[in-house]
Amino acid sequence: MKKIVVLTGAGVSAESGIKTFRDSNGLWEEYKIEEVATFDAWRRNSDLVLEFYNQRRKQLMEVHPNAAHHALMKLEEKFEVQIITQNVDDLHERAGSKNILHLHGELKKSRSTLDENLVYDIEGWELKKGDFCENGSQLRPLIVWFGEAVPNISIAAEMTEQADILIIIGTSLNVYPAAGLLDYAKPNIPIYLIDPNELGVSGISNLTFIKEKAGIGVPKLVEQLLETV
Ligand code: APR
């Protein structure tokens, strides 16, 4: 079976009703990254950080996967599909995709502040002060904050190197090292980039830019790819 690696960003969940970060009225227009998405913010004001992720977790419980998530699951009928997502939502999981690697963490999980290997599911939408790990340290969201290492990036790079086809959906390719995964793809494999906005990724001869929202562009591409097998 041919291997397809799919790199997704916030845009793949936009039509499910989850805000992106850098579009107009995106999350980073409403909140300052340095106030809610860095370890320093956590040290300075953990209540605000907990609240920021609690609100996003609460919203996540009210939204559903969209046509793009479902189409990616369908792709598994004839391809070995590995999703590498920058998103912390669980919409790929809920759409039924089997192989999902989260680069920036998972909203519905927490971790010990002192030991990143102690990871827990969060029951419901709230993570509160006084929720402790088994060693007695405060639980924090299982999110890779700006300035923190991305533990899964080397596995993600290895996966991308093995891809026969690379699909990139709904990411501004602004944030490294995730955005650098594009460079790990073998030189002549087909690359598809789906985004309603121009991204200025030019000069890549084997890249097909599909100027569509994910909910339209992904099902169309999946149908095309399934017909080739
Ligand atoms: N379908 C597809 N793409 C869309 C849609 C849509 N309906 N709506 C918006 N987009 C595109 C935008 O044009 C943009 O290119 O999705 C992209 C969203 O970009 P960002 O908001 O920068 O999100 P992302 O690339 O995922 O951000 C990467 O930055 O803030 C950190 O950790 C956070 O994982 C995030 C990372």
Image (cartoon, rainbow, N blue to C red):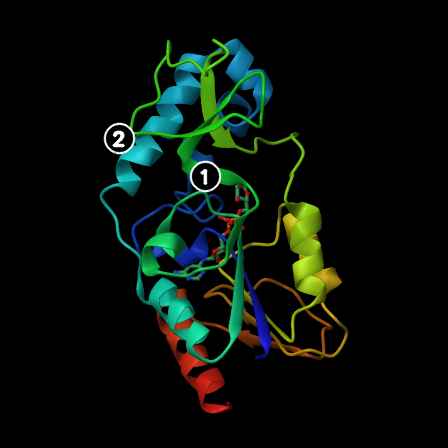
Q: Residue at x 75, y 71 (%)?
A: 186
Quadrant of res 103: top right
Q: Earlier in the sequence, mark 1 or mark 2?
A: 1
Instruction: Say few, some or many: other residues with alpha carbon within 10 Å of mark 1 (under 14 / 14 to 19 / 20 or more).
Output: some
Q: Is residue 75 above or below residue 128?
A: below
Q: Secondary structure at mark 2?
A: loop
Q: Secondary structure at mark 1?
A: strand
Amino acid, disc 2:
Gly
193 with respect to 18 (left or right): right
Decide which of 170, 197 is in the foreground and name it. 170
220 sits left or right of 111 in the view: left
Mark linked to residue 106:
1
Q: Position of residue 156 (x, y in %)?
A: 65, 53
Q: Which residue is mark 2?
A: 124
Q: Amino acid at mark 1?
A: Glu
Answer with the quarter of the image where residue 27 lies.
top left
Instruction: Judge from the rendering whether residue 181 lies leftward or rightward of residue 56; answer left or right.
Output: right
Q: Position of residue 106 (x, y in %)?
A: 45, 39
Which quadrant: the N terminus?
A: bottom right
Instruction: For residue 125, say whether it is visible.
Output: yes
Q: CA distance from mark 1 to mark 2?
A: 14 Å
